[in-house]
Image: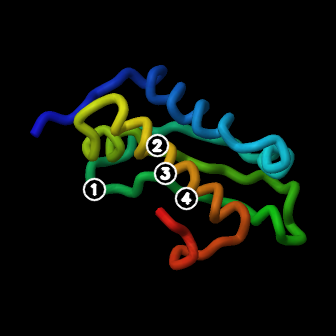
Amino acid sequence: MARVRVSLDRFRSAVEEAMDAFPEPFQRYLEYTEVVVADGSVEGPLGLYEGATALSSGYGMPERITIYKRPHEDRAETWGELVAEVRRTVLHEVGHHFGMEEDDLPY
């Protein structure tokens, strides 16, 4: 099965599009959240959230969401599948930002 491969810039645009899709009321809670795109490894995670949650007393401190390119590419056969997987991962990591635990997240 062939896997999709895209440039780092094209992958980054999919991540930015997913982040920009959050409704305005949520955008202010993402104001201090740095979004990083990294290559990652085939067996590694799709994403990682680091920092305080938007609901904690530490909110406003730097938070970071890292989205890993290679594992997304290895799960998708088309650009459309890759974009959908990136969106699910971004939703998952932003869910952590809002204090959700793994078992609470839909993705």
Residue 95 x, y percent position in the rendering: 64, 62
* Vertical position of residue 20 compared to residue 42: above or below: above
* Vertical position of residue 59 compared to residue 23: above or below: below
Q: Residues within 10 Å of mark 1 (few under 14, many from 20)?
A: few
Which colour scheme appears in the figure?
rainbow
Q: Secondary structure at mark 4?
A: helix
Residue in the picture at 61% in, 50% down: 65
Q: Secondary structure at mark 1?
A: loop
Calculate the distance from the C-alpha at mark 1 to the C-alpha at mark 3. Answer: 18 Å
Question: Can you identify the residue that label 4 sits on?
Answer: 92
Instruction: Name the residue nearer the viewer: 77 or 47.
Output: 77
Mark found first going from the N terminus, 1 or 4? 1
Q: Is residue 99 left or right of residue 78?
A: right
Residue 88: which numbered mark, if any?
3
Residue 92 x, y percent position in the rendering: 55, 59
The label nearer to you, 2 versus 1, is 2
Question: Can you identify the residue that label 2 sits on?
Answer: 86
